[in-house]
């Protein structure tokens, strides 16, 4: 299965013309050669693909919903729900994986995506806390520090 | 008002719905921006290094700078003369991907 997927990906990589017989314009997009090179050995590239990324190198998608899915059907609404997005301008973080990549591409017209590292991932509470403005004062001393006899 | 099937005129109290035949310059500029934003999303997913069939399909779509203006602002219609109509006539066109048309149209 994996070798079939990899060989298909490598076919896409070389040129887009094999798939564009039904289209007006020939696309000049090509898959990047960051993870694979057509000249490299197939066995080594497939083994590195199947190995899960190390915790430090795991990237995340930072997904923000910019346009709603109102009137676009239950499929797209379901995709947004599965991404954990409930309202416009909500930001959600998901690890890099084919499942989330496919979901993002299903709603690519509605969404803004950024690749971030693990250290930039924030939960909902953390995002809320970061939105809070600075207090403008610093508590130097309070009643809690006094001795009880002095009161 | 004075007979059956008279079209109502705005100055007689009827409603007015007019849609221009083609997009204005502003709408065309906004359409180009929208296409670029979708290009950015696809590019981000590509740069993440993940591989999936949805990405392979998305990479076959033409980018905004590769598209003819005809493809950016009009879309295939089987009913119109010339088999093309303004893309703004498609409901929800600002949230749909309409980059490709049947071959030859």
Image (tube, helix red, strand yellow):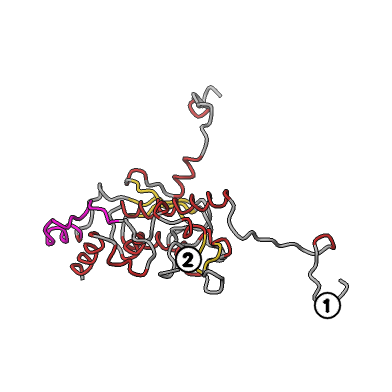
Q: Is residue B99 above or below residue B5?
A: above
Q: Circle 1 — which element? A: loop
- Name the chief secondary structure element in magenta: loop
Q: Quick check: A1 above or below B20?
A: below
Instruction: Judge whether B93 appears above or below B80 on screen.
Output: above
How many numbered markers are drawn?
2
Which residue is more in the foreground, B39 or B26? B26
Query: Looking at this view, is B79 or A147 the one in front?
Result: B79
The residue labelled by disc 1 is B4
Residue A68 position within the rendered picture, expressed as x and y whole percent measured from the top left: 53, 58
Q: Tell whether A20 sits left or right of A71.
A: left
Q: Is residue A37 magenta?
A: yes
- What x and y, as percent, mark residue A14? 22, 59
Residue A76's disc number: 2
Q: Secondary structure at mark 2?
A: helix
- Quadrant position of residue A108: bottom left
The image quadrant of residue A3 is bottom left
Are labels 2 and 1 on one chain?
no
**Residue pictured at 34% horizontal, 51% vertical:** A60
Distance between the alpha carbons at the discs numbered 2 and 1: 45 Å
A92 drawn magenta: no
Give the residues in magenta: A30-49
Quadrant where the C terminus of chain A is found in the figure: top right
Residue at horizontal 44 percent and vertical 51 percent from the top: B36
Left or right of residue A12, residue A79 in this image:
right
Residue at (50, 27) in percent of width and height: A139
Q: Which mark is residue A18?
A: none
Q: Nearer the viewer, residue B49 or B80?
A: B80
């Amino acid at each position: 299965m994996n070798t079939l997927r990899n060989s298909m990906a490598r076919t896409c990589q070389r040129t887009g013309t094999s798939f564009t017989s039904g289209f007006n314009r020939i696309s000049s997009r090509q898959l990047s050669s960051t993870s694979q090179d057509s000249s490299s050995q197939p066995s080594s590239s497939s083994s590195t693909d199947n190995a899960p990324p190390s915790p430090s190198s795991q990237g995340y998608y930072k997904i923000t919903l910019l346009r709603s899915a109102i009137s676009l059907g239950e499929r797209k609404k379901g995709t947004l729900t599965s991404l954990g997005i409930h309202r416009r301008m909500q930001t959600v973080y998901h690890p890099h994986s084919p499942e989330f990549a496919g979901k993002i591409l299903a709603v690519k017209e509605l969404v803004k995506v950024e690749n971030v590292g693990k250290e930039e991932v924030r939960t909902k509470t953390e995002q809320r806390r970061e939105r809070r403005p600075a207090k403008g004062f610093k508590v130097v001393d309070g009643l809690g520090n006094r001795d009880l006899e002095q009161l | 008002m004075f007979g059956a099937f008279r079209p109502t005129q705005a100055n007689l109290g009827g409603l007015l719905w007019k849609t221009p035949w083609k997009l204005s310059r502003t709408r065309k500029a906004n359409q180009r921006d929208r296409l670029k934003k979708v290009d950015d999303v696809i590019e981000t997913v590509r740069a993440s290094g993940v591989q999936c069939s949805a990405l392979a399909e998305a990479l076959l779509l033409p980018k905004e700078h590769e598209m003819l203006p005809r493809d950016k602002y009009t879309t295939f219609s089987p009913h119109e003369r010339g088999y093309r109509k303004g893309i703004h006539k498609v409901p929800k066109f600002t949230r749909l991907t309409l980059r490709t048309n049947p071959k030859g149209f």
